Amino acid sequence: MLGVSVDHVTPNPYRDPMLCLACGVCVSNRKTSVQDATVSFALCKKCDHSLRPAPVRRLESGLRVGASFAHEGAAKRLVHRLKYDAVAGLARELAEAMAPLVPPDALVLVPVPRAIVRRVRYGVDQSVLLAKELGRIVGLPSVRLLRSPVWRPPHAGHGRNSRRAQRFRLLSEAAAGGILLIDDVVTTGTTLESAAAAAGGGVVGSLAFTMSISVTTEAAASRAPSRSAGSGAPKPAPPV
Ligand SMILES: [Zn+2]
């Protein structure tokens, strides 16, 4: 694990050189923007250039899925550092990139919890951390409404049709509306659809940090309406 500082004290680049949060090389200054997003990652040029905005998708069920970046390059490495290296402090940085994409009809943030076996193995539930930090940034409550299955198959190497549906259970009565599901990565959307089914009819959409856009069956070339329009939302997605 790299000794990367992710606190929010303004660093002195001459006294405290920053390390790229994604790859660990030294960078001379802390970036104040990433492709117009209102984030303050410290990223090297190579990692910065690897970031690509993700499109808004609608899954077969009609669920709206948004994400800050495509699941590749530095964005993918940042997710892995959070969920596999348990660098919990990164959740704040990633949530800052997600904040401009919170839709105006969202009233409560509900994390899609990690399977219990994986939470124990890696020591972190990244979606819970992201929802908590995102809630602090946009001023919405984060509610742990869903209980995860004990185990679920990994995403890598599994096609959509071969993947078994996840089974989530409600921990309490679901809100009547305004539920925004929060996850770290969207691949095929199977997990999100399962979580949305468990959460009931109050789900207005979902938001993740990254999205795999190579497996989408339906994509819109525009972003979801922003809760903080004009605050520096990422650029419109390129055609996919
Ligand atoms: Zn880098």
Image (cartoon, rainbow, N blue to C red):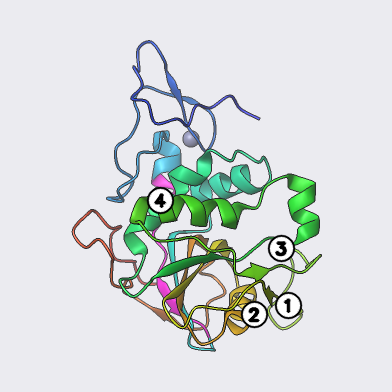
Residue 204: % across, % down: 43, 79
Residue behind mark 2? 194
The magenta stretch spans which residues?
A: 49-59
Residue behind mark 3? 156
Residue type indicated by callout 2? Ser
Residue behind mark 4? 136
Q: Residue furthest top?
A: 15
Residue type indicated by callout 1? Arg
Q: Which of the two marks, 2 or 3, is nearer to us in this view?
A: 2
Whichever of labels 1 and 2 marks the residue nearer the N terminus, that label is: 1
The CA span between labels 1 and 2 is 6 Å
The kind of secondary structure element at disc 4 is helix
Residue type indicated by callout 3? Ala
The kind of secondary structure element at disc 2 is helix
Residue type indicated by callout 4? Arg
Residue 11: % across, % down: 36, 21
Whichever of labels 1 and 4 marks the residue nearer the N terminus, that label is: 4
Question: Which residue is pictured at 49% across the width and 78% down the height?
Answer: 175
Residue behind mark 1? 167
The CA span between labels 2 and 4 is 26 Å
Residue 81: % across, % down: 61, 42
Q: Which of the two marks, 3 or 4, is nearer to us in this view?
A: 4
Whichever of labels 2 and 4 marks the residue nearer the N terminus, that label is: 4
Q: Which of the two marks, 1 or 4, is nearer to us in this view?
A: 4
The tally of labels here is: 4
